Amino acid sequence: MKLWGGRFAKSTDKSVDDFNSSISFDSRMYKQDILGSIAHAKMLGKCGIIPEKDSELIQKTLLEILADIEKGSVEFEVDAEDIHMNIEKILISRIGDVGKRLHTGRSRNDQVALDIRMYLKDEITEIKNMLISLEKSIIELAEKHLDVIMPGYTHLQRAQPITFSHHMMAYFQMFKRDIERLEDCYKRTNVMPLGSGALAGTTYPLDRHMVAQELGFASITENSLDGVSDRDFAVELSSCLSIAMMHLSRFSEEIILWSSHEFGFVELDDAYSTGSSIMPQKKNPDVAELVRGKAGRVYGDLMALLTVMKSLPLAYNKDMQEDKEAIFDAVDTVKMCLPVFTKMIATMRIRRENMYKAAQGGFTNATDIADYLVKKGIPFRDAHEIIGKMVLYCIQNSKVIDDLTMDEFKTFSAAIEEDVYTEISLEKCVSGRNIPGGPAKESVLASIENGKKFINTL
Ligand code: ARG
């Protein structure tokens, strides 16, 4: 017998039961559903809408059901459709008519809106904590490799020397913004919709603020239609997660490149890489590749959510049941990626000699030599031209600029003097960029300090 069966002369076709049912994926919200119902029942009793003793029995029984579910002794039924009706049905089966009073002044529409918000609030907090762990690992890497010089790239061509710490702290900034975005999204998720009813509120004098307080919500939704029919907080969360995955995918891509023989900048720990079933020599960066791949999956979830919600008339429509698998998948995927990614970067070995060699090899100090000439009074455009010729000469003679003799230097510009050798060293190129936000040790240390402060405020 369906909880809504009164109006129907025939029972539901089995195929419709299966099609309509969301229990296979919304059962994961059992705890939120039960806690929401307990708060609702408590408020109904307190406001005199149902007898106080009925309210107490409902609350007590719901807690027992929660314990039984956690013990694994409860089986949900497909034809009870979703988690909301499954739990209500179990409640009624245990305490009969008293249990039938729980749904007073409530609809599954505001109930499901409540459950998802509660569920996602917890997930946001969990993901935020995972991002904080990642940030801590990044800071550790940065602190350990302050003097490790590597080439910085544009167009994937060696550009200017930086340090590995500076490169790591770039990711720190990205994940910092991801954390801030999640905190912002949390604020909009932290609004309590119960009392919106099916769409038009209710005639019962519900104390919505009491329910919000019981459940730890900051405020209540201000429009009953909006309360039941928007899922923008889920779209927003999947958008925040997509951006975080985009950052993770870029980091992954670099690790994949860096661990290749061609780069040799890092070596992944054996525990965080895999072998090939045919090629005995292989050590593959599967973890980084999977994270890179899963970014696509999370983007897909965002698209699915946006498309499900597109053009839906107010208020609730059953289409919205499709929100759950997408947002759950996005959340699950990110939660799978973050811890393993964090451990992978925390255990990778940094091959500083190779980084240094690469920085030496690609004329990464060319800009600095041009700047050297500028300091000697030559206009930048002329300096650029002179150094361009110098680079060409080096390429033709298989040299790096640092190897040129003073006589060779003089053929390009009479302004070049003995101090050129120290002025264009990689160390000097880096330490000279001590502008705030730059790669010099003091600038990176300042950004590490700020980063630590940020983490401590969370
Ligand atoms: N399982 C439904 C969902 O996830 C719950 C709300 C059902 N409401 C309704 N009016 N059929 O959206």
Image (cartoon, rainbow, N blue to C red):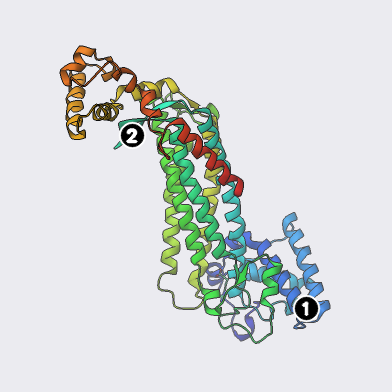
Q: Nearer the viewer, residue 140 or 347?
A: 140
What residue would you read off at disc 2? 153
Q: Is residue 273 visible?
A: yes
Badge 2, how many Cα within 10 Å: few under 14, some, many 20+?
A: some
Q: Residue at x 28, y 25 (%)?
A: 363
Which residue is located at x 20 percent, y 29 percent?
Answer: 378
Q: Residue flagged by tag 2: what amino acid is it?
A: Tyr
Corner quadrant of residue 260: top left
Badge 1 density bin: few <14, some 14–19, many ≥20, Cα 10 Å:
some
Q: Nearer the viewer, residue 10 or 342?
A: 342
Residue farthest to the front, as pictured: 377
Residue at the limit of the structure toward the right, as seen here: 53
Is tag 1's residue or tag 2's residue first in the polypeptide sequence?
1
User: Element at badge 2?
Assistant: strand
Decide which of 278, 223 is in the foreground and name it: 223
Residue placed at 49% from the left, 28% from the top?
145
Q: Quadrant of residue 58?
A: bottom right
Up the image or down, 123 lies above or below 1; here it is above
Task: Kindly identify which residue carries mark 1.
Answer: 45
